[in-house]
Image (cartoon, rainbow, N blue to C red):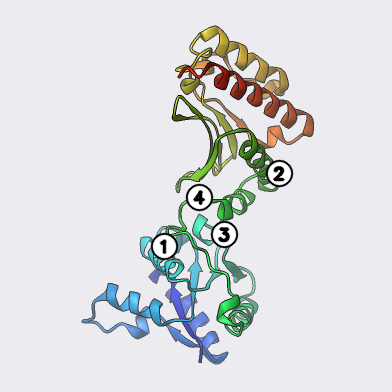
Amino acid sequence: MPKVFISHSNQNNDETLLIVEGLKRAGFDVWVDYENIRGSADWLCEIQAGIKRCDAVVTIHSKASLGSAWVERECLYAFQLGKPLFTALLDDLRLPLHLVNAQYCDFREDFAAGTKQLAASLTGALSVPESSIVYPNEANAAEANRANFFPYVEQLPGGEIASLVARDLFHWSARVADEAAFGGRVNPGCHVRINLNGRPVTVLSIWAYPKRPAAQIYFDRLAACAPYHRIRARRALLKRLNQILPAEFQLPASKSDRRPSIPLTVLSSAEILGAFKGILAETLAVLRAKQSC
């Protein structure tokens, strides 16, 4: 009998009970804390043992669990052990980084249908030979990485278009820059860097801001590098960017010493995105030619 660990917030005990009962009827051996942990037991040890012994982990994703450090820790521990992870989505909210690639079942409108879908998904996954299952290999899946960043962006406002622009900028930067590295938890991002005099300099970041994903240009860091150490050169670069941007997204002159952001959706046309990449490519070429930073 397949063993399933349930990760949940105790604020969702009523919903969790319904899911547990549904999975038991479907033939699963379900581990849930309020049934399996004795009052005097070491809570952390019991949780770890429960995850180790299970064949899969189901996380109950809700407004309550989104703020639960315990739920996140249980999911990350499951990732580290290579356990298949499934999400039961209770509320209308975006998935966090560590869950965006997990298979999710929708409980928001039809609880019975969600339970049926979850049981079917578990049956399908756990009947597959162990050697054919591909698990995430990130030690800390809550950090942004290539696998979870773009699905995460897709959930945000204008996410479908923003994700396409982000992917395009990532693949472009992987060709023209020295590094395109992912990172961040609260605000996940992809950071484009070049090496000048043996040290990395971040020129551009693609940020998954919750309200509006954006591309950010580091004028303040360019200010330490020739020829952009001169304010006139930075303002000229800012002016070139403004020439391709719509009027409502023009960058003020004061941003030439800061980190102005451009919404990814503004860069969605082929003409604007191509011009934006062209300006940045020239900027990288100038920095490399000077090698003074």
Residue nearer the viewer, 191 or 242 = 191
Is the Cβ of the residue at disc 1 closer than 8 Å to that at disc 3? no
Reading the chain from its start, which is encountered first: label 4 or label 2? 4
Residue drawn at point x = 70 percent, y = 23 percent? 245
Image location (x, y in percent) of residue 62:
50, 64
Task: Label 3: state its secondary structure.
Answer: loop
**Residue bearing mark 4:** 144
Specify the label residue 161 is tagged with.
2
Q: CA distance from mark 2 to mark 1?
A: 29 Å
Is the Cβ of the residue at disc 2 closer than 8 Å to that at disc 3? no
**Residue bearing mark 1:** 72
Residue nearer the viewer, 36 or 165 = 165
Tell me the mark number nearer the camera, choosing from 4 and 2: 4
Task: Label 1: state its secondary structure.
Answer: helix
Q: CA distance from mark 4 to mark 1?
A: 15 Å
Q: CA distance from mark 4 to mark 2?
A: 19 Å
Reading the chain from its start, which is encountered first: label 1 or label 3? 1
Identity, as a three-letter code, of the amino acid under mark 3: Val
Reading the chain from its start, which is encountered first: label 3 or label 4? 3
User: Quick check: 54 above or below 256?
Assistant: below
Image location (x, y in percent) of residue 140:
43, 57
Q: CA distance from mark 1 to mark 3?
A: 13 Å
Crowding at dot 2, Cα within 10 Å, few <14 / some 14-19 / many 20+, comes out as some
Identity, as a three-letter code, of the amino acid under mark 2: Ile
Q: Quadrant of the C terminus?
A: top left
Residue drawn at point x = 48 percent, y = 12 percent? 229
Image-based side of 244 in relation to 253, left or right: right
Residue nearer the viewer, 181 or 92 = 181
Identity, as a three-letter code, of the amino acid under mark 1: Glu
Crowding at dot 4, Cα within 10 Å, few <14 / some 14-19 / many 20+, comes out as many
**Residue bearing mark 3:** 100
